[in-house]
Image: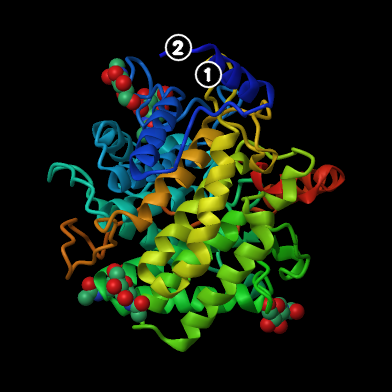
Amino acid sequence: MYTTSSVVAATALLGAGAAYAAYSIDTVADIKKTAATVAWDLMQYYHGNETGQTPGILPGPPPAGDYYWWEAGAMWGTLIDYWKYTGDDSYNAVITQAMVHQAGPNRDYMPPNVTLSLGNDDQGFWGMSAMLAAELRFPDPPPDQPQWLALAQAVFNTQASPERHDETCNGGLRWQIPWSNAGYDYKNTIANGCFFNLGARLARYTRNKTYAEWAEKTWDWVEGVGYITKDYQVYDGAHVDYNCTDLNRAQFSYNNAIFLLGAAFMYNYTDGSPKWRDRVDGLVDGAIRDFFPDGVAFEVPCETNMTCTTDMLSFKGYLHRWLAAATTVAPFIAPKVLPVLRSSAEAAISTCTGEADGRTCGFQWAKRQYDGSKGAGQQMNVLGAVSALMVEHNPDYVFVTADSGGTSKGDPNAGMNSKQYNPGELPPVTARDRAGAGVVTAVLVVSVVGTFLWMSMGR
Ligand SMILES: *[C@@H]1O[C@H](CO)[C@@H](O)[C@H](O)[C@H]1NC(C)=O
Ligand SMILES: *[C@@H]1O[C@H](CO)[C@@H](O)[C@H](O)[C@H]1NC(C)=O
Ligand SMILES: *[C@@H]1O[C@H](CO)[C@@H](O)[C@H](O)[C@H]1NC(C)=O
Ligand SMILES: *[C@@H]1O[C@H](CO)[C@@H](O)[C@H](O)[C@H]1NC(C)=O
Ligand SMILES: *[C@@H]1O[C@H](CO)[C@@H](O)[C@H](O)[C@H]1NC(C)=O
């Protein structure tokens, strides 16, 4: 019945400024419905499955489009999580086509098209998505195609190979892979974080202790050079010319989260050892302290002045997804983590009111309204945050191992015959000087704008 009084009441409500909201996460059905729409909107950025396009990548790299190669690798991981969390398999065929195509001719996520900007972190993000596919039992590709576990092992093996390890700074991986790339002189947390994370997960999945030894060694190195402090601040990296003492103290959320998830896997692999329990605990407290002021995800080095690069505009999604995943293998952290993931996701969806469709998501979640910042990263962040809420509701979201239901076929020697980018000797002196000079110039320019911009240079 349509009465005057109800019209008056409704008008009063709107007049009082009841905020418009496109999305809700109040019930499990709401979470799934919201995630489905945000996923659809994310996929509007992807054209790789259209005629004449390259399967697997987002438009780019700049200047051809906004996105570097790695970000699509991260996107497929986000969508594998989405599938497992919600059961919606609409994108599975696209995901498989993408991840198989970009594996490259040696099945190691070093396709020749991208080597001029190939970092260990870029390769690592694709490797972690392949690992996730194996762990969540994402459908295996046909037998003549690359297999998820073998792809993760190939990435790990290429990163463990002697050509990627040298004595500068007492060890650790460099950011870039070919010595001619700008950034080859930077040893950073994210490159080592990818290697650590993959090692920990391969150790738990295969129970081959070589992976665990590398994970231990990588943690010790990162702590040794002071990239992870006693208080669990996680810094970005430093340069080999300074023996890694010129610390870039920018704290990006994904650096914490990638180590947190790897540490949670080591905790699980070691049947709950006190050492790894302490590290997991420390990183969780550090994450909540540094990246969730008032319970809402905040990208510390760049959000205040909105100087985030396209890369950085996607980090919140990994923070949410990896914290959620960590609660499955280290359940003792769930009481601390889940309430924060919830409050942050609530803020996240409150920004999804933008543009003509009235549901485009923004970046500055704490503002609780659309901020005009749109893109694949912003959609992916919200998709990650919303779908990860299912971790409490979906008992099938389980990371299996080879002994507990895993079906993906591995190959311990995968990647062993991959192309070596820096065989034998050091690069010719002239080329080194040139690369070094370029980097010094870049550092000078960048330090004016803010050191955090550094990490996305040279991609
Ligand atoms: C590409 O994949 C999307 C799903 O993301 C689908 O809607 C679309 O029809 C596909 N396009 C082609 C040309 O297959
Ligand atoms: C490399 O680039 C070519 C030309 O754009 C494209 O056809 C091919 O599919 C790309 N390979 C990969 C693995 O992306
Ligand atoms: C364990 O992993 C290492 C490193 O990849 C490999 O060389 C070795 O063959 C593996 N062992 C087994 C039993 O698979
Ligand atoms: C370089 O740093 C490492 C610790 O990160 C230290 O063990 C080593 O002695 C340092 N080397 C020099 C030459 O200062
Ligand atoms: C390891 O992970 C499994 C879930 O895969 C969980 O049931 C188990 O409790 C975890 N182990 C520890 C020590 O927390």
Residue 53, percent across and down?
38, 20
Circle 2 Cα neighbour tier, 10 Å, few/some/many (<14 / 14–19 / ≥20)? few
Secondary structure at badge 2 equals: loop
Q: Nearer the viewer, residue 41 or 129?
A: 41
Q: Nearer the viewer, residue 382 or 149?
A: 382
Q: How many marks?
A: 2
User: Is residue 459 placed above or below 67 in the rendered structure?
Assistant: below
Please indicate whether residue 51 sits to the left or right of residue 442 in the image: left
Q: Amino acid at mark 2?
A: Tyr
Q: Which mark is residue 33?
A: none
Quadrant of residue 291 within the rendered picture: bottom right
Mark 2 lies on residue: 2
Mark 1 lies on residue: 6
Residue 220, percent across and down?
56, 79
Q: Nearer the viewer, residue 161 or 252?
A: 252
Quadrant that contains the N terminus: top left
Work out which residue is located at the far left of the displayed protein and give it. Answer: 143
What's the colour scheme? rainbow
Residue 105, percent across and down?
30, 41
User: Is residue 49 placed above or below 436 in the rendered structure?
Assistant: above
Q: Amino acid at mark 1?
A: Ser
Within the displayed image, which quadrant is ligand 3 positioned in? bottom left
Is the shortest distance between ligand 1 and the CB of mark 1 under 8 Å?
no
Circle 1 Cα neighbour tier, 10 Å, few/some/many (<14 / 14–19 / ≥20)? few
Q: Residue drawn 40% across and 29% down?
A: 37
Q: Residue drawn 79% across and 40% down?
A: 305
Quadrant that contains the C terminus: top right
Q: Are marks 1 and 2 in contact (CB under 8 Å)?
A: yes
Q: Is residue 452 visible?
A: yes
Residue 315, percent across and down?
57, 47
Q: Residue drawn 77% across and 44% down?
A: 304
Q: Residue drawn 75% across and 62% down?
A: 249
